[in-house]
Each structure stands twice: as C-alpha cells, then as structure tokens.
Amino acid sequence: MADRRGLLIILSSPSGAGKSTLAKRLRSWDDSIRFSVSATTRAPREGEVDGQDYHFSTVDEFKAAVTEGEMLEHAHVFGNFYGSPKGPVRAAINAGQDVLFDIDWQGAQQIRNSDLGQHTLSIFLLPPSIHELRRRLESRGQDDADTIKRRMEKSWDEISHWGSYDHVLINDDLDTTEQALRTIITATRLRRIQQPHLVDHVRGLQAEFEEMS
C-alpha cells in the first residue's frame, strides 16, 4: 500500500484566468501529478494517440460506461460526449498519485458527489478584474472577436459558482498563485483520510502501550 492516497485535484476558472498555465506549472513542480485523460466520442484528430490524449470510444460504449457508474463526470458538448473514466483515477490514487482535472463547476460537482469524492481538492481561480480577464483573452491571440465575446458571456456563469470550491485564489500574479497552490496541495496531502498507514500505526502504539501496562 502506498504511504498516502492520491488526491483528485480539481482546477476550475473562467477562460483566461490562468488555469492551463498554472496546471502546467504544477506538473513541472511535481511530475508525479498526472493529468486526467478524458474519454470522448469525437473522432481522433491528426496526431492524437488513444489512451494518451483521450480515450476514444463509441457513443454506445460511452453511454454504457455512464450507466455502469464508470464515469466520474461526463458532459455532452457540441454534439460529442466527454468524461473522466473512474478506473484509471482510482488506480492512481490507490498508488499515491495525484490526478489533476481541468474541468468546469458541473464536472467538479459530479466528482465531489462520486464515491471518490472524499479525496477531492477543489480550487477555483478568479481573475483580478473582468477588464483584465478580457485583456488576457485578447492578448493570447488564439480566438477571434466572436469567440472572445462568447467566452466573456460564459465567464460570469462560471464565476458565480466560486462558493462551492474548497479554496478560491485571485490570480493577479502567476508566481504568487503557484506558490499558494503548492502550499494547499502539500497541506491537503496530509489530511488524515489521505494517510491509510495511520490506522496501523495507532494500533501499534496501542499494543505498545498495553504491553507496558
């Protein structure tokens, strides 16, 4: 048995608040943190590898997995299903590996309500201001004006769910926010439920105490 159980680290934010950058920084800080590989019913794009980029499946296979309770969370997006298979995540946390989820508040809620929910650590990233959020989206140069407009319209719905997360950080400086994330993760790894060896250790202390009595 591993010295500790892994965490299901949920990182959520409106688009442009720095979530992807901070997720990569966490992986650089501790390469034992692994990204959750999602399942999807969409066709593979050029260069994508099954089991590495996504777990590709048919609609029937995906729906069967949902029915059998093998998806931690799932959603229907733009005509395709996406979800997080439970089996690989359970194996990872039993091996003491943390799994990082880059998902929205709905997916976060599903994971918290699952049978692995007691091992979740949910963190929401807020932008310093709405003006700064727009500036970051525009400065990335990845989206056209219509896409940025849609992302901004969606951002308030996402922000409105900040209160359902364990920790909320205002990401006005990447270095400061990264350090806060490291501190939160390090502390949460020490939660009693994440340390299965404690039960045997306390039993050993009890036996030692009784021998001395």
Image: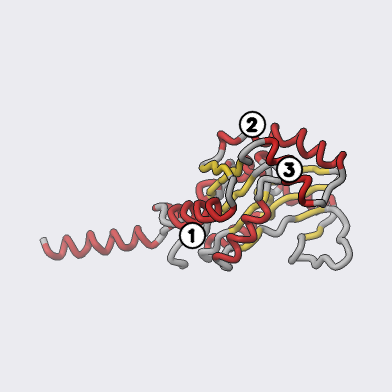
Depicted 2 relative to depicted 36: above or below: below
Q: What is the x, y in percent for residue 1?
A: 46, 67
Q: Is residue 69 visible?
A: no
Q: Residue at x 79, y 65 (%)?
A: 50
Q: Is residue 94 left or right of residue 69?
A: left
Q: What is the x, y in percent for residue 3?
A: 43, 66
Pointer 2: residues within 10 angstroms few (<14), some, or many (20+)?
few
On residue 135, the disc is: 3
First of labels 1, 3 by sequence position: 1
Q: Residue at x 48, y 51 (%)?
A: 184
Kind of residue at disc 2: Ser
Label 1 or label 2, whichever lies nearer to me, is 2
Q: Residue at x 47, y 67 (%)?
A: 2
Kind of residue at disc 1: Arg
Kind of residue at disc 3: Arg
Instruction: Give the residue at mark 1.
Output: 5
Instruction: Give the residue at mark 2.
Output: 160
